[in-house]
Image (cartoon, helix red, strand yellow):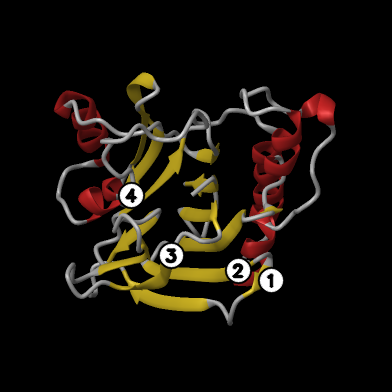
Amino acid sequence: MCLIALAWQAHPRYPLVLVANRDEFLDRPAAPAHWWPQHPGLLAGRDLEAGGTWLAVGASGRFAAVTNYREGRPVPGDRSRGELPLHFVTGNDAPEAFVAGLAAQGLRYGGFNLLAGDGDSIAWCSNRKAGHQRLVPGIHTLSNHLLDTPWPKSELARLKLQKLLHGDDFGVEELFAVLADRAPFDDHSLPVTGVGLDKERVLSPPFIVADGYGTRCTTVLRVDRAGRLLFAEQNFDNGERHGPPRLFHFTVGGG
């Protein structure tokens, strides 16, 4: 998962609105979002190489999402970051307790950001910065650096989500569009993350289409004040829609 825009307690009807793009190598096998038989009440896509996920939701309303921190490839022996959303959603710890406990465990992962929420609060942590943060109400973004780092694509996503929130209601396609922009940004606005200018250009838009790499799916999570949850996932193959959106509706706590 490489770009997330979320609104927390920022809309009168929907306390949580989240849109996320997963960017990954095109040849890395993955299964689309589904209910996991081995974890009843867990809804998520699955990375078929390491067995984890990038974004998971529970029937209880718990959710978690992970993004990589932009740096070199993981060191051999590192644990899969995709296990982190699974551990939170299938557990019982409050978000802040869970993210605080990760540092104490001393487990070795590649660079990551983790968002974890339970309907009452949302917490963020990264193993590339000490401590953790409880999200305040408002719009937040997360890409491959720290929470709310103002990369151009993150700020564009923030503005588009903020504009959408001005309406009383909005549907799946409007939410997908928040992260649908494919145009690279001007060179002068790009961050310098050590990957070189050509790669910075390729990675700069919210929706990435590149040789052998790109946005594999866009996921929407929307919860209303009555606890009705909408989970929607649109998969892509080389930038083209792969099948219709996968839609899941349920009431939090209702199974």
Q: What residue type is disc 2 on? A: Phe
Q: Residue at x 42, y 34 (%)?
A: 135
Q: How busy is the neighbourhood of tag 3: few (under 14 within 10 Å), some, or many (20 plus)? A: few
Q: Secondary structure at mark 1?
A: strand
Task: Measure the alpha-carbon separation of dots 1 and 2.
Answer: 5 Å
Work out how far the residue at label 2 is from the one at label 3, CA to CA, in angstroms.
13 Å
Q: Residue furthest top?
A: 130
User: In this orientation, does residue 171 appear?
Assistant: no
- Say if mark 2 contacts mark 3, CB within 8 Å: no
For marks 2 and 3, the one nearer the N-term is 3
* Kind of residue sitting beneath label 1: Glu
Q: Nearer the viewer, residue 27 or 6?
A: 27
Q: What separation in Å lies between label 1 and label 3 (alpha carbons)? A: 17 Å
How far, Cα to Cα, is label 4 from label 3?
14 Å
Rounded to the nearest angstrom, the CA distance separating label 2 from label 4 is 20 Å
Q: Earlier in the sequence, mark 4 or mark 3?
A: 3
Q: Secondary structure at mark 4?
A: loop
- Tell me the tag on residue 29: 3
Mark 2 and mark 1 in contact (Cβ < 8 Å)?
yes
Q: Element type at marker 3?
A: loop
The residue carrying mark 1 is 240
Residue contact between numbered discs 2 and 4, judged by CB atoms under 8 Å = no
Q: Quadrant of residue 30?
A: bottom left
Q: Which mark is residue 82?
A: 4
Residue at which label 2 appears:
236
